[in-house]
Image (spheres, helix red, strand yellow):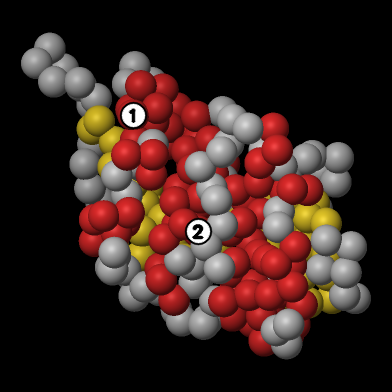
Amino acid sequence: MVVDVDRGGDTLFKWADHLPGMLWDDVRARDAREAALCVGGAWEEGVFRVPLLGYMHAVDPAAQRITRLEDPRHRVGYQSGVVLLYALARSMGVPPSGRMVSPLELTGGKLFFTGAHSLATGPLAKRYAAEPQGFVDRAAALGAERVEGADYAIRIPGLPLLPLYVLLWDGDAETQARAFIGIDDRALFHLDLGGVFALTNVLVGRLVR
């Protein structure tokens, strides 16, 4: 099932409360312990516990509710919900290869990640052009680690078995600062392209916030 992840500004598609019932059906149709194992989470007392970009989420398929364990009052976003439910329903539990690629290099990615699906690298570069250490500090607070590459580069668990990468280059008198978002080349064992797009948007949102 491909879920619309393009309407972040539409209040109807802003929150995880609005996720389609079919996604919840897909999660309930799968063996819960298998689903938890494949995403690197846990299944306890009828609730999944899944880390997503620095926060532990509780996913309750019976109540169709997603919350942050650290702050149950926080309203979880629609795209975070898409990532969590799709992964719980479909992830094959394949470990990461450690090989970073652009999402455009994934099968079908060159056509998918254009236009409305273009990766949100611009906001990252703009936010940290004059404060690159702030990028490193914010990423570290979300569980990232420094890696080699660019002027500043980090690897961060999107999901436990699906690392993301962000590379940032300083600007100078002749060139603007720029950013690159990478992902493990086994991403499609966990998410479809729409889920990858949603995951990168959640990443950017948490880094620039």
Q: Position of residue 155 (x, y in %)?
A: 40, 53
Q: Is residue 111 left or right of residue 41?
A: left
User: Of label 2 and label 1, which has the lower sequence position?
Assistant: 1
SS for dot 1 = helix
Q: Nearer the viewer, residue 148 or 169?
A: 169
- Mark 2 or mark 1, which is nearer to you? 2
Determine contact: label 2, label 1, CB under 8 Å.
Answer: no
Using the rendered image of the protein, determine whether residue 45 is visible from the camera's viewpoint: yes
Q: Residue at x 54, y 48 (%)?
A: 5
How many circles with numbers are drawn on the protein?
A: 2
Q: Is residue 74 left or right of residue 14?
A: right
In this view, 138 is above or below 98: above
Q: Residue at x 24, y 25 (%)?
A: 177
Residue 142: image quadrant is: top right
Q: Is residue 44 left or right of residue 7?
A: right
* Residue linked to disc 2: 195
* Residue count near mark 2 (Cα–Cα under 10 Å), binned few <14, some 14–19, many ≥20: many
Residue 179: image quadrant is: top left
- Distance between the Cα atoms at labels 2 and 1? 20 Å
Q: Position of residue 115 (x, y in %)?
A: 32, 39
* Residue linked to disc 1: 122
Residue 169: image quadrant is: top left
Quadrant showing the C terminus: top right
Q: Nearer the viewer, residue 108 or 33?
A: 108
Q: Position of residue 50 (x, y in %)?
A: 68, 64
* Residue count near mark 1 (Cα–Cα under 10 Å), binned few <14, some 14–19, many ≥20: few
Q: Residue at x 34, y 35 (%)?
A: 121
Q: Position of residue 79 (x, y in %)?
A: 60, 48
Label 2 amino acid? Gly
SS for dot 2 = helix
